Amino acid sequence: MCAYLIDLKGQEVQVNVVDGATLRDAQKHPENYQDLVIRVAGYSARFVELDKELQDDIIRRTEHQTV
């Protein structure tokens, strides 16, 4: 991964270790995921405090769909 990033002259990598199913469940049951913290464009945020549009965007990225 590092070599690939260097070859493409990348400047940023964000890694979240959570799957789309967990994030979707957090949308449905936010009371159960108050401690779910993710990285978003250089800062950390509680997933359940983000607006739905941003949550959906993060889920798409997590599932490697087109953004």
Image: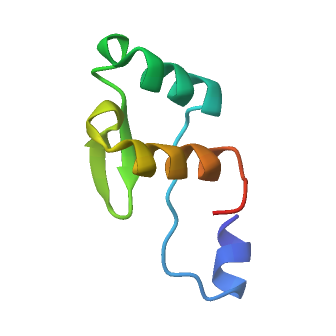
Q: Could you say where residue 25 lies in the image, as x and y percent from the top left?
A: 52, 19
Of the 4 image quadrants, the one containing the C terminus is bottom right
Q: Could you say where residue 51 lies in the image, as x and y percent from the top left?
A: 32, 44
Q: Nearer the viewer, residue 44 or 7?
A: 44
Q: Is residue 40 left or right of residue 12?
A: left
Residue at the spot x=62%, y=33% of the render? 20
Query: Can you tell which quarter of the image residue 50 is in?
Result: top left
Residue at the spot x=39%, y=50% of the render? 39
Residue at the spot x=65%, y=69% of the render? 2
Q: In this view, does 27 lie above or below 17?
A: above
Q: Which of 65 and 10 is in front in this view?
A: 65
Residue at the spot x=26%, y=36% of the render? 49
Q: Which of 56 and 21 is in front in this view?
A: 56
Q: Nearer the viewer, residue 31 or 10?
A: 31
Q: What's the image's color scheme?
A: rainbow
Query: Can you tell which quarter of the image residue 62 is in?
Result: top right
